[in-house]
Amino acid sequence: MNLHNLFSYVSSNIDNNGFYNASKGQNSDRVNIIALCRADLQPYQCRDYVANATVELLKACPYQKEAVFWHEFCMVRYSNEAIYGTVAIFPYEHAQRMESVLDSEKFYKELNILLDSLRNQTAYNSLPKKFGAGSRPDPNFRTIYAFEQCTPDITPEDCGACLTQSALIIPQCCGGARGVRILRPSCYLRYETDPFYNDTMVRTIQQVPTQPIVPVPGALGKDVIT
């Protein structure tokens, strides 16, 4: 019952940074929940995806004491154990494209440079959303696009460690794939050789005004479950 009550509030109460956490109940009846949307979503998109995710999670896991639901654009997790502020790298899932790159050795060299840069950006930036996104030329005359994100409740060190674990398994789990997603409770990593994230939204979030904005008079202002 506590789980159903908490889930009924998630979508409407998730903040504009796409994050929500709450707890309800005592002792063996206590339930803790975390929800996170991909950082390049608009708030209304985030709420819609999370609303659907909570419904699907309850259908798939009506009696479990802990579960996690991954969607391309959001993650919802609950547990009877404390989860806020605690990094979780297991369980994890991965998904990959069937197409392979032409020269995996050169490709991984460039990919790792990009992922290393984004990992530092994700873990240590001062934004409310703990994420990084960017691109790098691929030696096979394409472009590599990557996106990394952590739940904002964990430390920069834990965020970096979670993303490092994800990057390290890519050659083993998905050797040579042109696109990969690594999904963990505390972090998300994805790369593709085609654009997939909202670059305009990313730039808007990352933009830091150099001077105060003065108002002008009269101006008008699918899915993995485990």
Image (cartoon, rainbow, N blue to C red):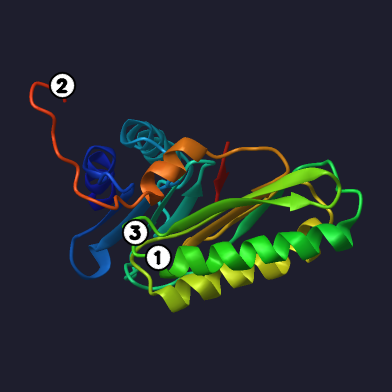
What is the crowding at mark 2: few (fewer than 14 residues within 10 Å), some, or many (at least 20)? few
- Residue at image position (57%, 40%) is 223
- Residue at image position (47%, 54%) is 68
Q: Earlier in the sequence, mark 2 or mark 3?
A: 3
Q: Is residue 48 above or below residue 174?
A: above
Q: Most extreme residue toward the bottom, as rendered?
A: 157
Relative image position of residue 91 (x, y in whole percent): 56, 64
Q: Is residue 184 above or below residue 198?
A: below
Question: Label 2 belongs to which residue?
Answer: 220
The quadrant in which residue 125 appears is bottom left
Question: Could you tell me if residue 37 is visible in this image?
Answer: yes
The residue type indicated by label 2 comes to: Leu
Relative image position of residue 219 (x, y in whole percent): 14, 22
Q: Secondary structure at mark 2?
A: loop
The quadrant in which residue 174 appears is bottom right
Camera-nearest residue between 42 and 117: 117
- Residue at image position (27%, 44%) is 16
Mark 1 touches mark 3? (CB < 8 Å): yes
Left or right, 172 with reference to 190: right
Question: Label 3 belongs to which residue?
Answer: 127
Disc number for residue 125: 1
Camera-nearest residue between 93 and 176: 176
Q: Secondary structure at mark 3?
A: loop
The residue type indicated by label 1 comes to: Asn
Q: Earlier in the sequence, mark 2 or mark 1?
A: 1
- Residue at image position (73%, 45%) is 143
